[in-house]
Image (cartoon, helix red, strand yellow):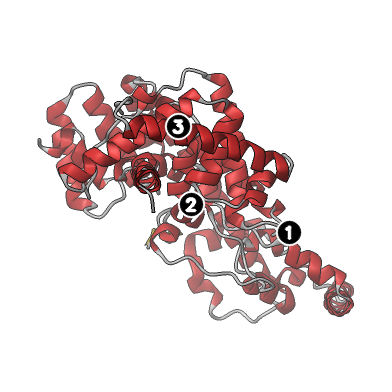
């Protein structure tokens, strides 16, 4: 799509991304392609890591602008996704430090075009609230490991690389936070917690 | 699988969906990014590949040969009094075309093009190039002027972008009056701007924020008729201009 001979900013967004193979002489993805491919998880990670709703838009935009600005530094030692996770983590951390008042009541339910049924929607909202309440109750170290390892299902070495800690530290924190989560689930199952 | 494991699985799956962005979130963040210069920048080349080419001895030899040929050709042209033709070296042209991104960074800057010819070419456009032989000074000047025109366009676009960004920031701060003022300034400075969709959407949202609903609805109708598939269409429909 062009307008007056100038490429539209949406052109890259609407067209399929070019799949660059390792070793192939090609360009790195542009911002539109990055956004389309990674927006969902960047948003989810930023939100789970405790960035307040009011700052989410700015955080996510900052992540993509940083990724785009530093893309030429990406050397392919980790996957692009892990590298973006790391940038998301650091950006979210900055916002979290700025505003420590992240609370689960900030979970704003917004209308979506593809709404599931009311029952499913309710279950999702309860699950989201439960996890956010749980994350608000654990230390920042445990929270980071839980979000990356359990929610995002990254491997322990990837989590260690993103957080900049030793692999054993990740395992240790993961064991602890999993135990906490199990307790919370037991409480939920026993009807003690009302998400 | 125990009940607890099942509960954990279902809670985590639900939370992943719930914590993800909605369509509105996506639209909002994308709208912000579209107004940044980075959105318009071409993708950078893979640095590792360039380094790989530089490290490989074959790559080094190949680069040396090409550079040597270019240099030799350039010096030859200069000695024969055709200095300006350097800008139109076939090899340099092909480098610029072969690179899928950022040709402006790769292609050499043209050597002094005649100003009076530049002016003429800027108004007559590509049609003038048809009869000119490759490597002639006139064609070199044309190449230079095309790049100059392109730079001018880029500079105008940057200014337009910058103003739009300011309008968006004002809108985000609930300062619709300022946002609308900036949009009006854009209308005056860039009546035929490139980012008209973005400008119109900003105007409509500003009018809504100022509760000037009639004007917003009128502008919204026109916007949706002109750009039904715009990335901003949903946002305009969701606003007071959507005719709810």
Measuring 17% from the left and 45% from the top, which residue is drawn there? B222
Give the labeled residue for mark 2: A38
Find the distance from the CA under tag 1 to the CA under tag 2.
45 Å
| Quadrant in the picture for the N terminus of chain A | bottom left
Label 2 element class: helix
Query: Can you identify the residue that label 1 sits on?
Result: B112
Q: Quick check: B237 above or below B123?
A: above
| Residue at image point 26% right, 35% down | A110
Picture coordinates of residue A80, whole percent (x, y) = 61, 56
Q: Chain of mark 1?
A: B
Question: Is B240 situated left or right of A70 in this image?
Answer: left
Label 2 crowd (10 A; few <14 / some 14-19 / many >=20): some
Specify whether A176 is left or right of B66: left
- Residues marked 1 and 3, same chain: no
Q: Nearer the viewer, residue A101 or A165?
A: A165
Give me the chain letter of mark 2: A
């Amino acid at each position: 799509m062009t307008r007056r001979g100038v490429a539209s900013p949406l052109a890259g967004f609407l067209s399929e991304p070019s799949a660059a193979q390792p070793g192939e002489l090609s360009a790195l993805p542009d911002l539109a392609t990055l956004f389309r491919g990674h927006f969902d998880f960047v948003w989810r990670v930023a939100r789970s890591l405790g960035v307040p709703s009011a700052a989410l838009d700015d955080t996510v935009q900052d992540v993509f602008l940083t990724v785009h600005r530093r893309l030429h530094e990406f050397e392919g030692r980790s996957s692009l996704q892990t590298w973006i996770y790391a940038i998301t983590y650091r950006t979210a951390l900055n916002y979290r430090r700025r505003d420590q008042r992240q609370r689960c009541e900030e979970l704003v339910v917004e209308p979506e075009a593809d709404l599931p049924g009311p029952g499913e929607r309710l279950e999702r909202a309860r699950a989201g609230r439960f996890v956010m309440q749980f994350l608000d109750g654990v230390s920042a170290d445990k929270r980071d490991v839980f979000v990356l390892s359990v929610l995002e299902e990254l491997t322990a070495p990837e989590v260690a690389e993103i957080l900049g800690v030793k692999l054993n530290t990740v395992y240790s924190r993961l064991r602890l936070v999993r135990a906490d989560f199990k307790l919370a689930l037991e409480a939920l199952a026993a009807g003690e917690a009302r998400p | 699988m125990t009940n607890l494991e099942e509960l954990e699985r279902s809670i985590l799956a639900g939370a992943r969906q719930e914590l993800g962005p909605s369509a509105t979130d996506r639209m909002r963040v994308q709208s912000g990014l579209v107004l940044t210069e980075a959105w318009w920048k071409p993708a950078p080349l893979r640095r590792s590949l360039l380094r790989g080419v530089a490290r490989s001895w074959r790559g080094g030899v190949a680069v040396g040969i090409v550079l040597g040929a270019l240099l030799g050709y350039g010096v030859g042209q200069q000695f024969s009094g055709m200095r300006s033709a350097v800008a139109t070296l076939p090899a340099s042209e092909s480098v610029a075309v072969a690179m899928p991104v950022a040709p402006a960074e790769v292609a050499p800057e043209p050597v002094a093009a005649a100003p009076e010819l530049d002016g003429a070419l800027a108004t007559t456009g590509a049609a003038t190039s048809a009869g000119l032989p490759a490597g002639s000074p006139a064609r070199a000047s044309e190449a230079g002027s095309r790049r100059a025109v392109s730079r001018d366009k880029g500079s105008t676009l940057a200014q337009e972008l910058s103003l739009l960004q300011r309008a968006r920031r004002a809108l985000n701060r609930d300062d619709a009056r300022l946002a609308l003022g900036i949009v009006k300034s854009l209308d005056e400075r860039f009546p035929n701007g490139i980012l008209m969709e973005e400008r119109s959407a900003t105007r409509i949202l500003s009018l809504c924020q100022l509760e000037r609903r009639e004007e917003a609805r009128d502008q919204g109708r026109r916007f949706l008729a002109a750009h039904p598939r715009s990335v901003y269409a949903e946002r305009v429909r969701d606003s007071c201009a959507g005719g709810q």
